[in-house]
């Protein structure tokens, strides 16, 4: 399941969707808004998304991870809009029969997301607002 | 042919519009579209940074041929996660 949304998520609720008898391990990654970036204070963040393409890319990454690592299921939720320090940005949960493949798949997903999902952060600092522009497809 | 182009993040701020129709000769490539957009908006400001091009929700090579009806998007390197 892939979701791009303004709304916050509940890790407990999302986790429950992936629990089943065949699953022996779940790996969770949560990205949050940090109060510092490249030595500068960050007061708030805005996230912009190209929703149709983001969902397409996230679905592709999810399919790749399931195939590559043989994990059972994956949920990815990415937020957009105005966020405060400490707010949730992104959630990745991977379920698998064993932990090894779940850790590997989770890292793969967040690494690929940072390279090729069209989402942009705008950080508000005391010096003004700035776009973060770092990732591109391999 | 007319191509509908969407802009995001710093590229949207640079062009000043979320999307627009760009007129191009038949058989134009993604790179040619990018250059045309840069010419169209060169009076506003110089866009020095990298511009990525996506067609129909996927990243494309600069040589990718465009056809009318394609959804094209121009945007800067991404920063999700």
Image (cartoon, coloured by chain):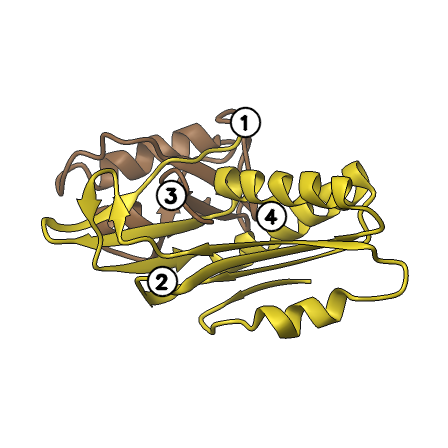
Q: Secondary structure at mark 1?
A: loop
- Chain corresponding to brown in the figure: B
Q: Residue B15 location in percent, x, y?
A: 24, 48
**Mark toward the start of the polypeptide (2 vs 4):** 4
Q: CA distance from mark 3 to mark 1?
A: 16 Å
Q: Secondary structure at mark 2?
A: loop
Depth check: A111 or A97 in front? A97
Q: Chain ID for label 1?
A: A
Q: Residue furthest left?
A: A127
Between tags 2 and 4, which lies in front? Answer: 2
Q: Secondary structure at mark 3?
A: strand
User: Which residue is identified by label 3?
Assistant: B75
Q: Are marks 3 and 1 in contact (CB under 8 Å)?
A: no
Q: CA distance from mark 1 to mark 4?
A: 14 Å
Q: CA distance from mark 4 to mark 3?
A: 15 Å
- Find residue A86 and name its label: 2
**Mark toward the start of the polypeptide (1 vs 4):** 4
Q: Residue at x 54, y 53 (%)?
A: A54
User: Which residue is identified by label 4?
Assistant: A57
- Count of labels shown? 4
Q: Is residue A74 left or right of residue A87?
A: right
How packed mark 2 is, by other alpha carbons closer than 10 Å (few <14, some 14-19, many 20 or more), is few
Q: Is residue A67 left or right of residue B22?
A: right
In the rendered image, residues at marks 2 and 4 fall on the same chain: yes
Residue B5 shows up from this direction: no
- Find residue A138 and name its label: 1
In the rendered image, residues at marks 1 and 2 fall on the same chain: yes
Colour assignment, chain A:
yellow
Report the quarter where the C terminus of chain A lies: top right
**Mark toward the start of the polypeptide (1 vs 2):** 2
């Amino acid at each position: 399941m892939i979701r791009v949304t303004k709304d916050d998520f509940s890790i407990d609720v999302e986790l429950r969707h992936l629990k089943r008898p065949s699953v022996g391990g779940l790996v969770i990654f949560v990205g949050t808004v940090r109060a510092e970036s490249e030595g500068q204070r960050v007061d708030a963040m805005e996230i912009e998304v190209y929703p149709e393409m983001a969902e397409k890319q996230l679905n592709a990454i999810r399919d790749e991870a399931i195939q590559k690592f043989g994990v059972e299921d994956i949920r990815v939720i990415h937020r957009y809009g105005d966020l405060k320090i400490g707010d949730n940005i992104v959630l990745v949960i991977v379920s698998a029969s064993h932990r090894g493949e779940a850790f590997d798949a989770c890292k793969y997903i967040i690494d690929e997301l940072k390279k090729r999902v069209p989402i942009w952060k705008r950080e508000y600092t005391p010096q003004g607002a700035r776009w973060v522009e770092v990732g591109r497809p391999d | 042919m007319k191509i509908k182009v969407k802009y995001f993040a710093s590229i949207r701020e640079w062009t000043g519009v979320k999307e627009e129709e760009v007129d191009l000769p038949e058989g134009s490539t993604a790179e040619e579209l990018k250059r045309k957009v840069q010419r169209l908006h060169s009076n506003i400001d110089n866009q020095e940074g990298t511009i990525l091009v996506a067609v129909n929700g996927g990243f494309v090579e600069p040589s990718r041929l465009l056809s009318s009806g394609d959804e094209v998007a121009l945007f800067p390197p991404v920063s999700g996660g």
